[in-house]
Image (cartoon, helix red, strand yellow):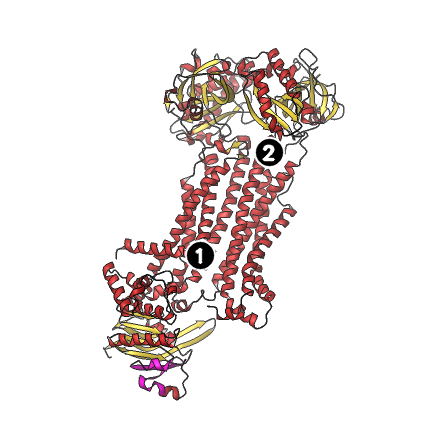
Amino acid sequence: MTAIAAVARDARHAFRGLRRAPGFAVPTIVTLALGIGATTAIMSLIDATLLTPLPVPAADRLVAVFGANQRNPYRSFVYSDYVDFRRDATAVSGLAAYLQWDLPVTFGDRTEVVSTALASDNYFDVVGVRPVFGRGFLSEEIVVPGEVPAAVVGWGLWQREFGGDADVLGKTFRINGTTFAVVGVAPRRFTGLSLTSSADLWVPMATYPRVATGFFASFDAVDYTAQRSGRRIGLWQVVGRLAPGVSFAQGQTQLRDIAQRLATAYPETNRDLSVTVVPAVTAAAPLSSRGDAVLFLWALFGTVGFVLLIGAANVANLFLSRTAGRRRELAVRAAVGGSRAHLVRLLALESLLLAAVGGLVGLAVAQWTTELLGSFNLPGGIPIDQLDLRLDLRVLAGAALLSVVTALAFGLAPARAVGRADLVSGLKASTGGDERRGHGLRLRHGLVAGQVALSLALLVGAGLFARSVRNALHVDLGFDPERVLTMTVDLGALGYEEPQAGTFYDRVIEQAAALPGVQAATVSSTPFGEAGLGVGSVYLRGTAEAVEVPRVTLARVGPDYFATLGMRLVDGRVVGAADRAGEVPVAVINAAMARRFWPDERAIGHQFNFAGPDGRFFTVVGVVGDAKYTSVGERDALYVYLPLHQHLGAAAGDAMTIQLRTAGAPAAMAGTLRALVREIDPAVPVYDVATLNERVAGVLMPQRMGRALLAVLAGLALLLSAVGIYGVVSYAVAQRTREFGLRLALGARPADVIGLIGRQLLWPIGGGLFLGATIALVGGRALTAFLFGVTPTDAATFLWTTVLLACVACLAALVPAVRAVRMDPMHALRYE
Amino acid sequence: METDSLIRLQDVKKVFYTDEVETHALSEVHLDIAEGEFIAIAGPSGCGKTTLLSLLGLLDSPSSGEYTLAGESVAKLDATQRAFVRNRQIGFIFQAFNLIGDLTVQENVELPLTYRKMPPAERKKRVLDALERVGMAHRTGHYPSQLSGGQQQRVAVARAIAGKPAILLADEPTGNLDSKNGEAVMQLLKELHGEGSTICMVTHDPRYAENADRSVHLFDGRIVRDEASDAAHELEESGFELH
């Protein structure tokens, strides 16, 4: 017989054997599939976020370059610095600049907000991306924009707005009144260099003056003369490709040298300014929160790894049970001439068959898990659904290999037993012989202890996240998020002048407030969850030197803002309808700001500004209670509320958020409000419609994701552990059925026998709980950054999760134990 | 040295070690089995009958002594070589039948042949021949659980003879059968012996031992009597309790 025919026959037998043993095959396949699937999905997420986040050629040769001073190591570049670096840097083969914004783009008569990158002429060359249709930017487009500037559309936008039409080249659209013509289509996977915001459109940086609106339109960010005219506000992100043969360190050194030369040449603007160079793949996630994202992802991976290990222990336990039940069959095969190689082949085929089916089902689980992950954001606001999240075949292969190794390691155990010349006992074996005192049972108990330990660690983690979310949902936000609808409008592209914008907002607020079911209406520049405009220097009236602070956030708010949001007035008055242009510039500050600058006196009446002694000062007219602005965990954030009508110059071009407090469900008002805005001006783009509660929930995404994923994974771990314990106890009971029958026949009470079984599990479960608590104590520290209002050593969490796991373990053990004592003793005594 | 013995044991000992206890299962066993002989091994429980059969079947190794099968010493064969010898030279019949539940009757009988490089056609012919020989050719597609005990043992006999081994080793082949089925299996063994098969059978039933040419009686791991089987009943009368 040929070897192939022999393998085919063994495979057939293995398949049939597994089909006839669903109690073994199904849990094994399910366990393998869950372990492989979950690990693959999470590793794919890690790969897409941290390892290979940029779908560009030789991504490891791309470097992100930031300006750096003592306060901020990740500053954006001013244009003239970029020009100087681009001219002088030979360590890079190219240095590109870009700036990514959400801009209202008008296609025909419809306006859509599109994430748009203003990019230098060499952007696509430096990044290494070749448009699938058409071309990138030409060098002349940087200096002399044509009458119709060029644009490269992203794959998504091409599909959405142009129907994937191959004749898209030359088609036009408008941004802020300027017409652009499509010259290329970006590849499907390329959405820019940021994980937090996918670019869907690229236009030349030279068009900045045409597309910039609001605050950003007030200065020229593209200074072609590169004359350093005192501009200090940098906007440009810079990315370079290391020249061939140049190491990262060499590139970094040269760029720092250039920064030093510029600091000497332009001390007024560049003094103390250096550069920070980081791999572009690292900078793809926001550097300020990258640490959190990294920690979160690896914690997630560790969690999935725990589940995989628990699954492996389960597979091992299942195989050990099957091994015990197959001793006689294998001994017979050996007795009739099957060599160890024959037996290994049969068992290996069985294991591989299981691993293959488990792997295939795992693939489906991975796909499903990946889709599930798409509804979450990572720390740092990285939307998972915008990542290039594809099942990583390397990871799949790795997880499958682990499963195969586990299956083979334990699946081949019977062949080892046969090799130990215990054929005679094997031929006499009934349910597998008595291993009660043997190595097998110790191993099985060890596996149960491991499962219990890892399950408890996961349960504690899930418990801590659950408490964090609960605490966060009950924290005093400083405003009332119930029954508030938010909707963003953007007048930037419509060419509104100040009076027109003021009229627009007045009409919207007035008409919205009059809607049935609306209790109050207002507008603001910075809704909850958005960072808004911030400054770091505050000048107090009468002092020449600025007070440096980490950040003061400026929000422009309409009348009734505080009433609409339900914020508490601490002192003075709130912004009112009378605070209009031409009146005394006023400001309402939060209590933290008052404490920071006027700790021992009333803040009311004091004056401050951000522009210096010669600038216009704001008079503090009110102090409101501290609130949460961008996250529920922030503390002592400094906040200044400026009347909208005194700052319409910027608001006319900026996006503003309308906010309604409603009597009923706020989401139900969305259509009405949208219609109202359309009625006033149908051209105004409307987006980001959400209730305030949804915005609050959005900033709790990492905690919610942690809670959801850990709850699922911990539940899975609990289930697997219960199955493992059940399997061990069932097996132990089967081994000792005759003994239990004898004990019962001799007068033992059922409780005595159950106690006997229970005592056997005391050590593995008790030891597992102790070990699990230790792992949770040590590992919980890694979660500190994501916990809110609860410590990683929270006693209550440890207690209830331990009790929960102990109860589940007892239940899993009790079922087969009770079954054993209900058996007729005579039946048990005859049991083979 | 005689050269016509199919099996020769010389001064074979088997010692089992469990914890600190040393159990001498077999001591100073000398045994010759000639080709074509039908030998019964009898003795009280724990006397070493099954251990002796396990040694003969290469399921276990002697602690000391020499074991020659068909003129070849088998004491120092490795596991693979022992499997080869078991497959080619020895056919087993067990008290508990030991058919594999996941395999059909045909596959069970075919099992030892699959470990040989035998063309499928020949394999199939041998299987059918063996099943016809035991009267089970009509049940090839059945699984063991669908057969009676007597039928299962007949299939086990077919499996043992399908490979045309040098010797059949039967360990209490009627032990799990009622008297009618037991008689049928014994009749089958007698017929096989009549056709020239060498058979070595462990039995505690003197009626079945009488079917053998010769009875070897063990006591405390030693052969205490080796005689023609017609004297077996006298042994029972002399006080041996046969189990």
**Is residue A577 toward the left or the right of residue A427 in the image?**
right
Q: Position of residue A78 (x, y in %)?
A: 52, 19
Badge 2 crowding class, 10 Å Cα cut-off, few under 14, some 14 to 19, many 20 or more, is some
- In the image, what residue occupies the spot 57% across and 20% down? A675
Q: CA distance from mark 1 to mark 2?
A: 45 Å
The amino acid type, in three-letter code, at marker 1 is Phe
> SS class of the residue under badge 2?
helix
Vertical side of B223 occupied by A396: above or below: above
Subunit bearing disc 1? A
The residue that label 1 is drawn on is A319
Question: Label for residue B167?
Answer: none
Query: Is residue B218 found inside the magenta-colored segment of the image?
Result: yes
Instruction: Name the quarter where the N terminus of chain A is drawn.
Output: bottom left
Please state the extent of the stretch shown in magenta in the rendering: B205-233
Q: Earlier in the sequence, mark 1 or mark 2?
A: 1
Q: Nearer the viewer, residue B31 or A332?
A: A332
Vertical side of A792 occupied by A682: above or below: above
Q: Quadrant of residue A121?
A: top left
Q: Position of residue A798 (x, y in %)?
A: 62, 48
The amino acid type, in three-letter code, at marker 2 is Ala
- In the image, what residue occupies the spot 57% across and 56% down? A811
